[in-house]
Image: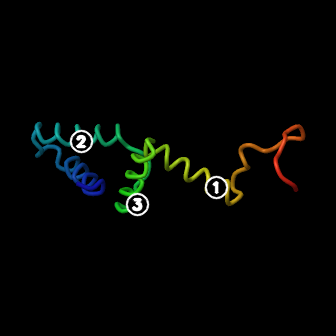
Amino acid sequence: MSRDQFVHELESAADQIADTSRADLQVVLRRAALLLRNVGGLSLDPRTDEVLSGLAAEMGKAKLDLVDTIIAEWLVANAYLPVPHQLDEESTVDGNA
């Protein structure tokens, strides 16, 4: 069940709370709690999500950590964030400028 379908089901149960059985409410509320516990903050296209999950597993990282790394590196590469390890005057470098 997709997140949107679940949200619709939750809203429907809230609208018909007097007609909803206790057991059905328990199921819906437990699913809501589980969804909130596992929320990553991003809703991704299923193909993108699948690729990220596979890549995270291959790299031994959590998917959210991988997404954070990808976004941070993109922001640095496109000059939205400063380079994290800038050289100071005392740093040694190899090569010529």
The mark that comes first in sequence, 1 or 3, is: 3
Q: Dot 3 surroundings within 10 Å: few (below 14), some, or many (20 or more)?
A: few
Residue that label 3 marks: 48
**Closer to viewer: mark 1 or mark 2:** 1
* Front residue (pair 42, 93): 93
**Closer to viewer: mark 2 or mark 3:** 3
Evaluate if marks 2 and 3 touch, with contact meaning CB atoms under 8 Å apart: no
Q: Dot 1 surroundings within 10 Å: few (below 14), some, or many (20 or more)?
A: some
The mark that comes first in sequence, 1 or 2, is: 2
Evaluate if marks 1 and 2 touch, with contact meaning CB atoms under 8 Å apart: no
Query: Residue 74 falls in which quadrant of the image?
Result: bottom right
**In percent of the image, x 41 and y 45: which residue is there?**
40
Residue type at mark 3?
Thr
**In percent of the image, x 19 and y 48: which residue is there?**
13
**In percent of the image, x 35 and y 40: which residue is there?**
38
Residue that label 2 marks: 31
The percent coordinates of residue 67 (x first, y second) are 50, 50
The percent coordinates of residue 86 (x first, y second) are 78, 44
| Alpha carbon distance from label 2 to label 3 | 24 Å
